[in-house]
Amino acid sequence: MAQIFHPSTNTLSRLSLFGAVFLLAAVAVIGAGIVRSSYVTEVGVAREQPVPFSHKRHVSGLGIDCRYCHTTVEESSFAGIPPTHTCMTCHSQIWADSPMLAPVRDSYQTNRSLEWTRVNDIADFAYFDHSIHVKKGIGCVTCHGQVDEMPLMWRAHSLYMEWCLECHRHPERYVRPREEVFNMHWQPPAGAQLALGRQLVKEYDIQKLTACSTCHR
């Protein structure tokens, strides 16, 4: 029987198969890169707000503790957004006529809350409790980044499940003394994090919770 296809067709077939495999692999790699890029995760992207509030100015410059504004962080799942009268405690006297703070004054006078844009916004299908993390010795900076150096607030981490699980699987790498939770610049003694972490994991009775139901309820 006469040969239907030229022998070179075999080479073309092999090249096509290998090319398809490499193309799929390239698409997968590119897709994974996009999913983890700041374009999708918004890591490092400052969010526009009704007032350009500077954590760097208030925390680092003025030394205001996180709990002064985020009043419920120690006893509630939600850290709390400060009401306008908290802002006006100072700004009724300081920069009282600043055009930049006009939305704050309007909010105070009309008793209508400012509509802040959530920066660290976890998906609705995941549950997160601030208070339990504070009680277990997880510092603000661990999740929110170096807030005291942010002139405008941005997301420091992806908030992906794999990021959460890294801490849940190895809490000894991240836990700190409770009295240092709100300290933006606390560091363990050189090379002592794991030893201190294991001690605190035992002392604070920290469980390595990785079951789906821990966060997905």
Image: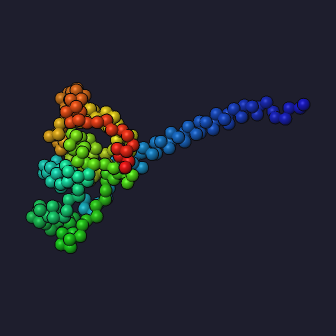
Q: Which residue occupies the foreground of this view, 107 or 150?
A: 107
Give the quarter of the figure containing the N terminus: top right
> Residue at image x 23%, y 48%?
131
Where residue 4 sits: x, y (%)?
Answer: 84, 35
Say if 162 sits above or below 79 in the image: above
Where residue 205 appears, as percent x and y from the top left, is 23, 35
Figure disc tally: 0
Where does residue 209 sit, x and y in percent of width and height? 33, 38
Which is more toward the observer, 90 or 160? 160
In the picture, residue 163 is in which quadrant? top left
Q: Is residue 8 above or below residue 211?
A: above
Q: Is residue 191 visible to the viewer in this orientation of the structure?
A: yes
| Residue drawn at the location 31% of the way across and 35% of the way down | 208
Residue lying furthest right: 1
Which color scheme is applied? rainbow
| Residue 160, quarter of the rendered image | top left
**x 34%, y 41%: residue:** 164
Percent of width and height locating residue 68:
15, 54
Q: Is residue 146 visible?
A: no
On screen, residue 90 versus residue 210, left or right, reads left
- Tell me which residue sits at (61%, 36%) in the image: 21
Nearer-the-camera pick, 18 or 214 = 214
* Residue reaching furthest to the left: 93
